[in-house]
Image (cartoon, rainbow, N blue to C red):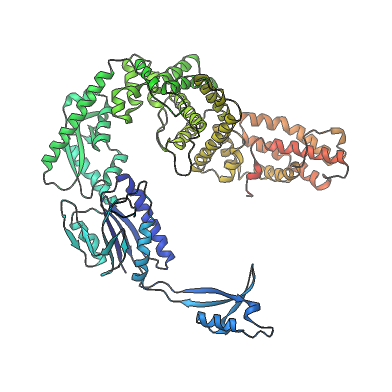
């Protein structure tokens, strides 16, 4: 059987819809399977005005199931001769089974009597009536609303509900609205109510009423229409996936509209024009064919409706774009009257985090951190100066009129104004780059100086936020600290930059102490707690990143606590991943496993060679002495493959020692000495990581 449910609502914000439809589909599958109504297919579709669940191949009734019910204990249900008591007879009658069909099962609480009976499934319509309100009520949205006088909360007010199983209405109520067979068409193309006779007719009915229900079909339609409109304007669309996603969920019936603006506005920086079109109006820019960098004085918008009145719509779009670009040109001209460095002086009046000073204080700390990072990475004097200068100017564009109007241009305008102020192009590029990456999967800074300033910015923010007690809790992260931490880790990993995170945190704390004059931010118990919590937070981002790269979870856990250097941890984890199939890895792991348990009992690692009486322990000591300098040299060089090969040579000596020598000797000096030898071995193996975390292969 076919089933369709449509919930008509007032316009839902575009960003809410993709996750809501994913929830509806996933939860719909799960709910029907748990209700023993597994369908042949199920899909969730939607527009700003409706959430739709379509189900095909639904069984007429639930699958029957065997229900097992526990009754009295065996001692109560049967007498000493095994005859059923009144308790057993009553229980069997209550369950509708013969007393002879009762079974006794052993449970953690003792032996009990159980009845098994076949429960027939209920009709699908009845089950759906109970299931659908619960399913809709379980949907989660970033923001919910109440309306009218009720206390019910949903993403937007519910206006109608259609629910059809074949040709029958599935009756239920949700948010005070009763289900029926009536839907609505497109708001302007078919505004009236529309009755649907059968579930399989629903899609055709709403399509004929001007609604493109499938988001994938709407997105394809938008791309094709926008490309045609850009061609009519004489160019090619500057396609933007994020904008396309947003526009897809802003319209039920998308129609592309091309427009033009005065060519004089092309004197504005390219990013300004694109941002005005994209963020203010949700319009696509148009470029010169074959030249991605050159824009045409044209744009393409997407309206929700048909071709009627398209010229009026175009004129309105053009009028708004002209006004926005005029504002941008005014802001740009005014901003250029003041050098970028002067704009930065205004940051003294802009707060950063509560109790953590101003943006100007942050910039001062970033400059110090940039110098520290440049030194850590071994940069020369000139590049270090570029990093420090870029950090000094990194936030200056926040005070400009353009960025106050269009915050999306942070960094972009900083680069532009730096170049116009005569700054080194390397400094200007680093100003733009330091905001990267803005989200998972975003591009990384293109220059080393940009990476340094980006790292300094993120370190300063994370240390300040954790010191202020603003670390994320649950799903709440209002300051974007997870994003900042992930970006920091990703830059270090992608660029192969070697940096002790603990050392970097301490330097950031010292910068806070110096700039704000608050020693408690850099030393003492509170500062140590901040450092420890932030290191744990960053290590979790390392786990996420390595997991995305396909590293086995046990290998990640083996190395993530062994070093606070992201690049070093990556080298170790990758080496484990690559070496897992090599014989030397199995030998090294086998030797370690035999050693580590006993080694934990050692009081120290002081070995007295004179107490090594048995040949196997002398041979193990000699093998260790020969292996140690070689293995340590490989470890210091980060050559973990050769390190594993070196420590694997110890396995025969380890096996002989543990098989033939009594480690826990009754004589205390011998016992302590043998445990110390094993401690030495465990520590040598531990140079790679905590191999006890590695699962048996």
324 over 692 or under it: above or below: above
Q: Position of residue 572 (x, y in %)?
A: 59, 36
Q: Nearer the viewer, residue 313 or 597?
A: 313
Specify whether 370 is left or right of 233: right
Image quadrant of residue 181? Answer: bottom left
Residue 528 can be seen in this image: yes
Residue beneath the point at 28% across and 42% down: 244
The picture places residue 346, in percent across and down from the top left corner, at 36, 19
Q: Tell whether 125 sits left or right of 598.
A: left
Above or below, comparing residue 9 to residue 442 in the picture: below
Query: Quadrant of the rendered structure where residue 275 is?
Result: top left
* Viewer can see residue 377: no
Quadrant location of the N terminus?
bottom left
Number of disc labels: 0
What's the residue at 25%, 22% (across, down)?
331
Give the camera-side residue of 649 and 47.
47
* Residue 526 as seen in the image, left or right of residue 49: right
Residue farthest toward the front in the current orientation of the protein: 149
Q: Position of residue 679 (x, y in %)?
A: 75, 38
Where 460 falls versus 95 (above or below)?
Answer: above
Q: Position of residue 14 (x, y in %)?
A: 30, 45
Instruction: Find residue 507 and report its image quarter.
Output: top right
- What residue is shown at x 21% (from left), y 64% (from top)? 196
302 or 106, nearer to the observer: 106
């Amino acid at each position: 059987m076919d089933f369709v449910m449509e919930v008509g609502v007032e316009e839902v914000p575009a960003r809410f819809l993709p996750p809501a439809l994913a929830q509806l589909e996933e939860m719909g599958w799960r709910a029907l399977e748990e209700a023993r109504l597994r369908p042949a297919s199920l899909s969730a579709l939607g527009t700003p005005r409706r959430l739709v669940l379509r189900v095909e191949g639904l069984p007429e009734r639930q699958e029957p199931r065997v229900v097992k019910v526990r009754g009295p204990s065996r001692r109560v249900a049967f007498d000493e001769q095994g005859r059923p008591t009144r308790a057993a007879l009553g229980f069997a009658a209550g369950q509708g089974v013969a007393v002879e069909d009762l079974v006794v099962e052993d449970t953690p609480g003792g032996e009990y009597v159980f009845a098994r009976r076949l429960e027939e499934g209920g009709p699908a319509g009845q089950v759906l009536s109970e299931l659908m309100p619960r399913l809709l009520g379980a949907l989660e949205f970033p923001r919910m609303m109440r309306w009218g006088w009720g206390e019910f909360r949903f993403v937007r007010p519910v206006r109608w509900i259609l629910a059809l199983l074949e040709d029958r209405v599935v009756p239920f109520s949700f948010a005070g609205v009763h289900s029926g067979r009536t839907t609505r068409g497109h708001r302007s193309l078919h505004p009236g109510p529309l009755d649907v006779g059968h579930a399989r007719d629903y899609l055709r009915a709403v399509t004929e009423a001007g609604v493109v229900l499938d988001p994938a079909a709407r997105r394809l339609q938008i791309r094709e229409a926008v490309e045609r409109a850009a061609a009519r304007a004489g160019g090619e669309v500057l396609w933007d996936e994020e904008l396309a996603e947003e526009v897809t969920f802003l319209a039920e019936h998308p129609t592309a509209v091309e427009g033009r603006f005065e060519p004089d506005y092309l004197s504005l920086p390219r990013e300004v024009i694109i941002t005005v079109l994209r963020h203010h109006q949700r319009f696509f820019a148009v470029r010169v064919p074959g030249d991605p960098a050159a824009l045409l004085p044209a744009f393409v918008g997407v309206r929700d409706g048909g071709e009627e009145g398209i010229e009026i719509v175009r004129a309105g779009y053009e009028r708004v774009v002209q006004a926005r670009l005029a504002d941008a040109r005014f802001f740009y001209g005014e901003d250029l009257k003041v050098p970028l460095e002067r704009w930065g002086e205004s940051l003294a009046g802009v707060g950063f985090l509560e109790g953590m000073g101003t943006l100007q204080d942050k910039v001062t700390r970033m400059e110090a951190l940039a110098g520290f990072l440049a030194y850590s990475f071994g940069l020369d004097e000139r590049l270090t100066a570029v990093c420090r200068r870029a950090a000094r100017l990194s936030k200056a564009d926040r005070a400009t009129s353009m960025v106050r109007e269009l915050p999306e241009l942070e960094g972009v305008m900083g680069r532009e104004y730096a170049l116009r102020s005569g700054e080194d192009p390397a400094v200007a590029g680093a100003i733009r780059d330091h905001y990267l990456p803005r989200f998972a999967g975003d591009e990384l800074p293109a220059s080393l100086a940009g990476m340094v300033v980006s790292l300094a910015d993120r370190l300063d923010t994370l240390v300040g936020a954790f010191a202020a007690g603003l670390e994320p809790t649950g799903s709440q992260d209002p300051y974007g600290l997870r994003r900042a931490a992930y970006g920091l880790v990703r830059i270090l990993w992608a660029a192969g930059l070697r940096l002790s995170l603990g050392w970097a945190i301490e330097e950031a704390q010292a910068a806070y102490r110096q700039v704000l004059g608050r020693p408690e931010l850099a030393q003492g118990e509170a500062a140590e707690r901040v450092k420890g919590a932030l290191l744990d937070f960053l290590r979790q981002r390392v786990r996420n990143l390595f997991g995305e790269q396909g590293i086995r979870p046990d290998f990640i856990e083996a190395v993530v606590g062994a070093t606070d250097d992201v690049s070093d941890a990556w080298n170790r984890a990758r080496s484990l991943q690559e070496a897992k199939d090599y014989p030397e890895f199995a030998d090294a792991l086998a030797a370690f496993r035999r050693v580590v348990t006993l080694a934990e009992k050692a009081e120290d690692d002081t070995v007295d060679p004179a107490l090594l009486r048995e040949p196997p322990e002398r041979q193990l000591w000699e093998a260790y002495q020969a292996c140690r300098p070689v293995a340590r040299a490989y470890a210091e060089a980060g050559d973990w493959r050769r390190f594993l090969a070196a420590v694997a040579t110890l396995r025969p000596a380890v096996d002989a020692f543990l098989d033939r020598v009594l480690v826990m000797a009754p004589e205390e000096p011998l016992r302590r000495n043998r445990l110390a030898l094993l401690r030495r071995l465990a520590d040598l193996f531990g140079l790679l990581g905590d191999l006890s975390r590695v699962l048996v292969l």
